[in-house]
Amino acid sequence: MGVRRFDLEAGGERFAFRPETEETIAFWRGKYPADRQQSAVIPMLWLAQRDNGGWLSEPAMREVADRLDMPYIRVYEVATFYTMFQLKPVGQNHVQLCGTTPCMLRGANELKKVCEKKIGRKHAVTDDGRLSWEEVECLGACVNAPMVQINDYYYEDLTPESFGTILEKLANGVAVEPGTFVDRLNSAPQGGLTSLTDETLYDGSMAAPIASLPNAPEPAAEAAPETKGQPDAQPPTNVAREAKPAAEAEPEADLAAAVEGDKPDALHEVPAAGADNLKRIKGIGPKNEDQLNALGIYTFAQIAAWTPENVKWVEGYLSFPGRVGREDWIAQAKVLAEGGETEFAARVDRGEVESSEDDD
């Protein structure tokens, strides 16, 4: 990128934001803390550019710096770095012509000739102040190449003829609707759809049940009765605890004692009022609820009372380290135990959470 210098002579001595812009300035500054107001420098410069006829004069940059309590040089650095900021006067309709490869292959060079003929050299402004132009890098509309951006809007799928007509209308003060200039809807195929046009594809008539998936693996043969319940010869590697042969497996009590932390207090039977629906806590699905019930955990109040050592024990015993804290089970349980409702619990009650109905 070449050196970018601002025009000291054309900018005059003073600049002031338009009164109607003050509300937008307050909106952007309100996004940042009082001690981080300088973070609003880019939107402030953009608003200054709009209020200054489409370009940034040196007084406009100073006004932004004064409002944000910034050294002038820091604002100059931002304005000269980002090419979205124009540092010299531009026309009422400033054309940014994409010359990057996709647009070039589709005729951008011919559009440049139109600009040179109707406007003049790059960065020149017509005598009436209506038009100016420059070449820019990719504007992200390659599928609609070649294209230009005029002020805030895209004009796409151009030919030298259609582009010339646009410039003539703008030069005469006639507004031109942006968008594509060929027979297509946005970025859809030119001339309309050529595939997937059968309406039965979308009316549900083809949604017949599928008997089987092509190339699906054959179901595994059922294990012989004498081998049922035995561990796999090669247990999966994604389990949290390494499986042991049945003869060497630790008793449940020994396993509980081996887990670090303190086992939470348990209820020896379901409360008379019934067990709470623990699936209303985000992170607890049917399987986790069954495991908790097996440990004597039936209510929100029990979970709400867990200590850090209890959490450590539960996470270790159920083999999902960090999950209770990461999903904030305790905070959710406290709200629900007090009769409140969380956003997730409300979704469960409305049947919108599949994991509360099926195994997660």
Image (cartoon, rainbow, N blue to C red):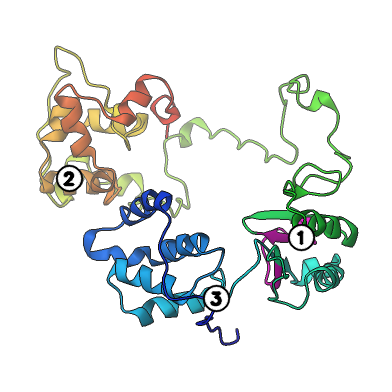
Q: Report if residue 299 is visible in the image.
A: no
With 166 as the anchor, is 19 left or right in this view? left
Along the line of sight, the residue nearer the viewer: 166 or 280: 166
**Where is residue 296 shown, x and y percent of the image?**
17, 28
Residue that badge 1 annotates: 147
With 87 as the anchor, is 358 left or right in this view? left
Name the amino acid, label 1. Met
> Mark 1 falls on what kind of element?
loop
Quadrant location, the C terminus:
top left
**Residue 160: which quarter of the image?**
bottom right
Closer to the eye: label 1 or 3: 3
Considering only order in the chain, which callout, 1 or 2, is on the residue closer to the N terminus? Answer: 1
**Where is residue 228 shown, x and y percent of the image?**
46, 34
CA separation, marks 2 and 3? 60 Å
With 212 as the anchor, is 66 left or right in this view? left
Residue that badge 2 annotates: 311
- The residue lying at 78 percent from left, 49 percent from top is 180
Magenta residues span: 132-150
Name the amino acid, label 3. Leu
Q: Disc 2, disc 3: CB below 8 Å?
A: no
- The residue lying at 23 percent from left, 47 percent from top is 325
Q: Residue furthest top?
A: 272
Q: Residue furthest bottom?
A: 3
Closer to the eye: label 2 or 1: 1
Residue that badge 3 annotates: 87
Considering only order in the chain, which callout, 3 or 1, is on the residue closer to the N terminus? Answer: 3
> Mark 3 falls on what kind of element?
loop
**Where is residue 133 shown, x and y percent of the image?**
71, 70
**Where is residue 31 shown, x and y percent of the image?**
33, 54
Along the line of sight, the residue nearer the viewer: 283 or 49: 49
CA separation, marks 1 and 3? 23 Å
Name the amino acid, label 2. Val
